[in-house]
Amino acid sequence: MKKHVLCLAASAACAAPAFAQNSVTLYGVIDEGFNYTNNVLGNHNYELASGFAQGSRWGLKGAEDLGNGLKAVFQLENGFDVNTGRLNQGGRMFGRQAFVGLSSPEDALKLLRLMRERLGATVTSFELIGRNAYDIGIRHGGARTPLEGAHEWFVLVEASSQAQSELDEAFAGALEAALDKGIIEDATIAASLEQRSAFWELREGLSEAQGKEGGSIKHDVSVEVGRVPEFIREATPAVEAFIPGARVVAFGHLGDGNIHFNVSQPVGADKQAFLDRWEAMNEIVHGIVARLGGSYSAEHGIGQLKRALLARFKDPASLAVMREIKAALDPNGVMNPGKVL
């Protein structure tokens, strides 16, 4: 059971006129939340969650009188993570986002390669979303449907640059080339800040939305980027065979090889009975990850939940060195006790 408490949501704006008929406004919103999970394998878990309600952001907007009743209006906006200070869009002010429908993880990998070939380092986000995850996000997350059609997989891709005109042409051209090559089935480019926010609302709300489908066994894993489709193709039938009716809810950062390979309980199943098989399910998924040369701990680290996995997969010599470093830096064991080691 997970409870969310929104700790802080504040906004501030100030305006400074440049000329009598012109104005520029600096505005911002700070959005920070606190997550408390009261029972995960018998443990409590606490974490800060930046952007829980609407996302922290700052921006500039203004208008300039052109005469004859005409005005030039502009708005520049960027988001940031309160916990880390990291800027969205790679810290760049101009960004383009598209929601893409395609048939397979293999096609998503082809799209990633094409976008990087054409756009280079301006590709700042590439989020893979499976059909089950997409449907759950729409059903419970309150997000609008970005694309119609029976697509099996989706990608949210974002590119960012300091030069808007060059980015617009290159971004649209890359998607058009992908459509011509049959890599993607459909795509829509965000035409406003509201559409961009709607795209990210769907992606960022997936974990919360999945909790409304009952029990969920989670795996935060990573493999080489080129092996992500192979992992998904092997792990999906393995967990479905282990628990018939179980639903794979896969999504994550394809550009980093990091996949949240979560498994929702069968519809109508007993939640606790499903969760009681957590460790056995982990054994299946983590075994496949290990065979593919990946990691059972990707984005969220070891913490408390994966200490046993660390002891199992890490060689004894490395663990001994880690303990010696820990003892030297924290002889009294007061720094983050009970975590990792």
Image (cartoon, rainbow, N blue to C red):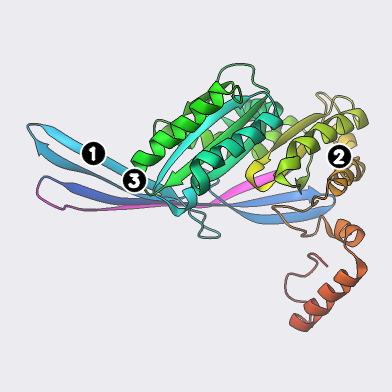
Q: Secondary structure at mark 3?
A: strand
Magenta stretch: dominant secondary structure: strand
Residue at 80% across, 32% down: 233
Q: Nearer the viewer, residue 56 or 10?
A: 56
Q: Amino acid at mark 1?
A: Val
Within 10 Å of disc 2 (Cα), the crowding (few <14, some 14-19, many 20+) is some
User: To which residue does mark 2 refer?
Assistant: 275
Residue at 91% across, 45% down: 283
- Give the vertical position of 205 relative to 86 (above or below): above
Q: Is residue 72 visible?
A: yes
Q: Amino acid at mark 3?
A: Leu
Residue 331: image x %, image y %? 79, 83
Q: Real-space Cα distance between discs 3 and 2?
A: 46 Å
Q: Secondary structure at mark 1?
A: strand
Residue 302: image x %, image y %? 77, 59
The stretch of residues the image draws in magenta is 2-20
User: To which residue does mark 1 refer?
Assistant: 73
Q: Amino acid at mark 2?
A: Leu
**Location of the C terminus (image quadrant):** bottom right
Within 10 Å of disc 3 (Cα), the crowding (few <14, some 14-19, many 20+) is some
- As drawn, the residue found furthest toward the top would be 149
Labels 3 and 2: the sequence-earlier one: 3
User: To which residue does mark 3 refer?
Assistant: 76
Q: Real-space Cα distance between discs 1 and 2?
A: 53 Å
Q: Real-space Cα distance between discs 1 and 3?
A: 11 Å
Mark 1 vs mark 2, foreground winner is 1
